[in-house]
Image (cartoon, rainbow, N blue to C red):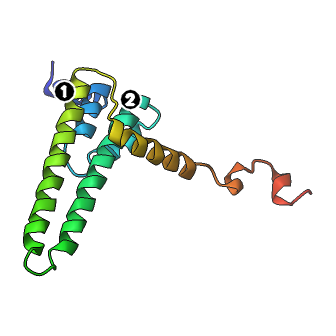
Amino acid sequence: MSLLSKIKNYTQSFYNFITSEIFLSYFSALPLFFSWLPTITWKYENKNLRDISLYSCIHFIGFISLIVIAVFIVNLPFIGGYLANLFHTIGILSYLGLSVFLIYLVATQKKIVIPIVSRYKDLLEEFIEGQSKTAPIAQLDRASDYGSEG
């Protein structure tokens, strides 16, 4: 085999691995910022990947909200720095803990149900479904709909 065909085979196998469901499940569950975004963008029709990505998104939103709370609390006199550090630590530990738990659920192929977060996942899914509806102008498909009959 020539070097070019080997490179082509390696790139094809790498592409197949990157687009496989198991890799995308692990990638979207990782505690990296916005690692869930490519998965939910490219593979939204896959329910399992969508659920994992939405759970990861909610964990990220919770982490960012605790960091924002810490930024505002730090300005309190005397105790502000301690409370801000406490909120920051709680945010980091909860984000990493929930992400590791999500990776564990993906690895063991168990049904992903996190009761506290499931409600928010459903709300986020409804919001995304509501935003993805096509605009009325995009549904027009005939010339008579545009008002030119002739």
Looking at the image, which is closer to me, 109 or 4?
A: 109
Horizontally, residue 35 falls left or right of residue 115, namely left
Residue 70 is situated, as x and y percent measured from the top left of the image, at 18, 67
Tell me: residue 8, above or below residue 36: above
Residue 53 is situated, as x and y percent measured from the top left of the image, at 34, 40
> In terms of image quadrants, where is residue 3?
top left
Point out which mark residue 10 bears.
1
Tell me: residue 72, above or below residue 54: below
Q: Pointer 2: what residue? A: 48
Residue 21 is situated, as x and y percent measured from the top left of the image, at 32, 27
Task: Residue type at mark 2: give it.
Answer: Asn
Residue 144 is situated, as x and y percent measured from the top left of the image, at 86, 53
Residue at (7%, 79%) from the top-left corner? 78
Task: Indicate the quadrant containing the N terminus: top left, top right, bottom left or bottom right.
Answer: top left
The residue furthest top is 1
Q: Secondary structure at mark 1?
A: helix
Looking at the image, which is closer to me, 92 or 46?
A: 92
Residue at (71%, 49%) from the top-left corner? 139
Work out whether residue 89 can be spotted. Answer: yes
Task: Indicate the quadrant containing the C terminus: top left, top right, bottom left or bottom right.
Answer: bottom right
> In terms of image quadrants, where is residue 96?
top left
Q: Secondary structure at mark 2?
A: helix
The residue furthest right is 150
Horizontally, residue 140 falls left or right of residue 34, namely right
Looking at the image, which is closer to me, 150 or 135?
A: 135
Horizontally, residue 43 falls left or right of residue 84, namely right
Residue at (38%, 29%) from the top-left corner? 48
Residue at (9%, 64%) from the top-left corner? 85
Disc 1 crowd, CA 10 A, few/some/many (<14, 14-19, 20+) = few
